[in-house]
Image (cartoon, grey):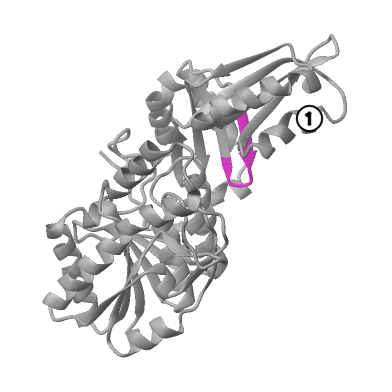
Amino acid sequence: MARIVMKFGGTSVADLDRIRNVASRVKREVDAGHEVAVVVSAMSGVTNQLVKWCTELSPLHDAREYDTVVATGEQVTTGLLAIALQTLGVDARSWQGWQVPIRTDGAHGKARVEEIEGERLVERMGQGQVPVIAGFQGIGPRERITTLGRGGSDLSAVAVAAAVRADRCDIYTDVDGIYTTDPRIVPRARKLAAVAYEEMLELASVGAKVLQTRSVELAMKQKVRVQVLSSFEDKPGSLVVDEDEIVEQPLVTGVAYSRDEAKVTLRQVPDKPGIAATVFGPLADANVNVDMIVQNLGSDGTTDMTFTVGKADLPRAREVLEKARGAIGFADVLADPEVTKISIVGIGMRSHAGVAATMFKTLAEKGINIQVISTSEIKTSVLVGAEYTELAVRALHTAYGLDAPA
C-alpha cells in the first residue's frame, strides 16, 4: 500500500464526462489499497473567464478581490469530483485551501506556500476517505484567500505530497510524460522514463511547459517523487526523481525552447564601474526579470549592453529605461520581440567537454546566427531569430542523438 497524491489539470476536468473519468482513475487507486488525496485545477477555460471579468471591471483591480474571484474555479471542481467519487461508492470530501489549511504569504496573485498542516489529511486518508483539495489557492496571514500564480495547482500538489509524506505525487495532464523535446515540432521525440530534479528544473525554466518551475523546486527540496502521466491513456509516465535513481545519465536529456523572450540592446552605455547596477537596478525595482546578458566593449569608452526580458515585460522595461536614460547615459535603446531562446539540458554535461561546441557548430551548419549565449553547469542557452525556432530544435535534437528510431 502506498500514499499517493493525484493532481488533475484543467483539461483533465474540462467537463462532466472527464470528471467522471478522473473519478474512475481515483477509484482504481483506492481499490488497489492505496491511501489517496486528490488536487484539482479549475475546469479548462474557467480561470481565464474569471480573470477577464476582473480585468473588464477594473484593469487596476484589488489583488485581494481578484484572488477571491479566481479561486472559485477550483472550488467548483472539488465539489463536482467529490460528488462523482461518492456516486462510485468512494468516500470523498472536498477541501478548500483555507480548510486544510494551506498557509501562504500575503503576495496576492503569486503567493508562496509557507506551511501546510497535513495531520487532518493524513487522519482522513487513514480512515479510507479521499480528500479532494483545491489547487492554486491558500490562505494568507490576514485570513484572506490567496492564489499561487499560473500553474499553481502543480505547486499545491507537490506541497500537499510533502505535507502528508506521500510516496509519490502523480501529475495527470494532457500529455503522457516528459519528452526529449516538443513532439509537435519533432515527431521523433522520445518519452523519458526518468528525469533528474535539476534537469526538470532547468527544462521548466527555459520553456518546457510540462511542470511549473516552482513545483519542481519544491519537489527537489522536499525529495517528493513526481510522476507525469496522461489522464486519457493508460500508459507509463515519466518520473522526476533524484539523479541517484537514474542509472544511465545521457549527455543531453532534452532540447527546450521559449518564444516568450524579447531582446533589449542599450547602445553606447558609458563603460564605468557601477553602470550595470544603474541599468538593472530600476528594472528589478519594477519587477522586470532579466535573463540572458551580454556586453560588447567599444574603443570609444562605451559599451553596448544586450539582455533579454519576458515578452510581456517589454513595454514596462522600455518605459523604465527611458525614465533612467539620464542616469544611465545610453545613446539609444533597441528592442526585438522576434526572438526565441533555445536550450540544451543534461546532467551528463557536467563531466563532458565539447557539448556547447556541438550546439554552436550545428546551428552554424544550418545558417542560424546566435545572438546571445548563456550557460550553467547543466544547461546551454542561445538566442536566435524566431523564424529559426523549429529548424534549430530539430537540428539539435538530431545532433545529440535524441531522435527515436525510425
Hey, what amino acid is under mark 1? Thr
Residue 267 image-quadrant placement? top right
| Left or right, 160 with reference to 133 | right
Residue at coordinates 48% horizontally, 54% vertically from top-left?
64
Q: Is residue 111 above or below residue 314?
A: below
Residue at coordinates 31% horizontally, 63% vertically from top-left?
75
Residue at coordinates 44% horizontally, 79% vertically from top-left?
164
Residue at coordinates 20% horizontally, 65% vertically from top-left?
22
Residue 185 image-quadrant placement? top left
Magenta-tinted stretch: 373-379
Q: Is residue 293 above or below residue 32?
A: above
Magenta highlight on residue 62: no
Q: Position of residue 181 (x, y in %)?
A: 38, 41
Q: Position of residue 334 (x, y in %)?
A: 61, 15
Which residue ends up furthest to the top in the rendered image? 300
Instruction: Look at the numbered disc 1 and give the secondary structure of its residue.
Output: helix
- Name the dominant secondary structure of the magenta segment: strand
